[in-house]
Image (cartoon, rainbow, N blue to C red):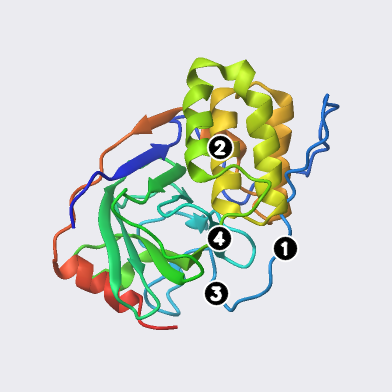
Amino acid sequence: MGGLKHFTYLGGMTLTIGLTLAFAAPQLKAQSFDISLEFPEGEDIGAPERTGGGGQRGIPNIPCVPGNRRLTALTPTNNLITTISPNPKLFWYVPPTTAQAADFLLLDEQNQEIYYTRIPLTHRAGIVELKLPDYISLTTEKRYLWTFALVCNTDDRSQDHFARGWIQRQPLQTGIAPPEELNTLLDQLVYEPEGIKKRLQEEGSNYAQERIWAETLMILARLYQQFPNDSAIADEMQELLTSVELDNIPINCWVHSCSVETQDAEETQDAEAMRELNKPL
């Protein structure tokens, strides 16, 4: 497959806060309009844990992750990413790691490979943002399995530290902006930040109420990056993370971003190793 892959690794050199740090759920500040970024709890679908584990069961420590910090998928509590986009953005918290790269693999319901890429990493903790390329088009109401793995040892992929879960595209619903309109608003945010901010806050609330996770998180991430000193937006981001039990992810992980490029993935032993991790559940 060809096409442009979009990827951002977010994190600061001074970030020392680990996953063990928890934030108290704050109250929203008084605003001129009433919104809620609390994400409704979804049904249990038997998805795998969104917090990463080792490739081998019973290994107490992850070789490329010091301490007790863990890779964490930024997903709802049931680990099902819902979206209305054919190629949404996905997010993970990556702790400080000696791994130089991460692998991402997406499979369909027949366990057929849809997309695979290798992602260079820094050693810093932060948020990894991956947009599925434009040539990917998820089919509505079909469920896909993704795996995101820190490559701890290129010679022994059983030592990978990985998280995996489901993603499902939902039909477009009334009352929320379609993908094209939402992307236009996000583009305008750069040029008209104050004029677009309120509209995006409202759209984020609408998406949350409709249980559309990918767009809810994407909107809040962009708003917080654009307005890191806005206490109302910070509270909304915290409310969203707290509602899905991710309040141990420091929200300052979303700022001080730096961009890296993904590497084109060939059909290699690494891809085969990823497929072994993704045998049907």
- As drawn, the label of residue 171 is 4
Looking at the picture, how far across and down is residue 159, in whole percent? 32, 69
Earlier-in-chain disc, 2 versus 3: 3
User: Which secondary structure, mark 3?
Assistant: loop
Q: How many C-alpha atoms fall within 10 Å of the one at disc 2: few (<14), some, or many (≥20)?
A: many
Which amino acid type is marked by label 4? Answer: Pro
Provide residue 214's location: percent of width, then percent of height: 54, 51
| Secondary structure of residue under mark 1 | loop
The outermost residue toward the right is 30
- Residue 41, labelled with which disc? 1
Give me the C-alpha separation between circle 4 and circle 2: 23 Å
Query: Could you tell which of marks 4 and 1 lies nearer the N-terminus?
Result: 1
Query: In the orientation shown, which residue stands out farthest toward the bottom?
Result: 280
Q: Residues within 10 Å of mark 3 (few under 14, many from 20)?
A: some
Front in this rendered view, residue 121 or 268: 268
SS state under label 4: loop
Q: Are marks 4 and 2 in contact (CB under 8 Å)?
A: no
Q: Residue at x 29, y 75 (%)?
A: 112
Left or right, 147 with reference to 192: left
Q: Which residue is mark 3?
A: 47
Q: Position of residue 178 (x, y in %)?
A: 54, 45
In this view of the protein, can residue 100 be seen by the observer?
no
Which amino acid, by three-letter code, is at mark 1?
Glu
Quadrant in the picture for residue 8? top left
Circle nearer the N terminus (4, 2): 4
**Residue type at the position of mark 2:** Ala
Marks 3 and 4, the one that precedes in the sequence: 3
Q: Answer few, some or many: residues within 10 Å of disc 4's Cα (few below 14, many 20 plus, some between 14 and 19).
A: few
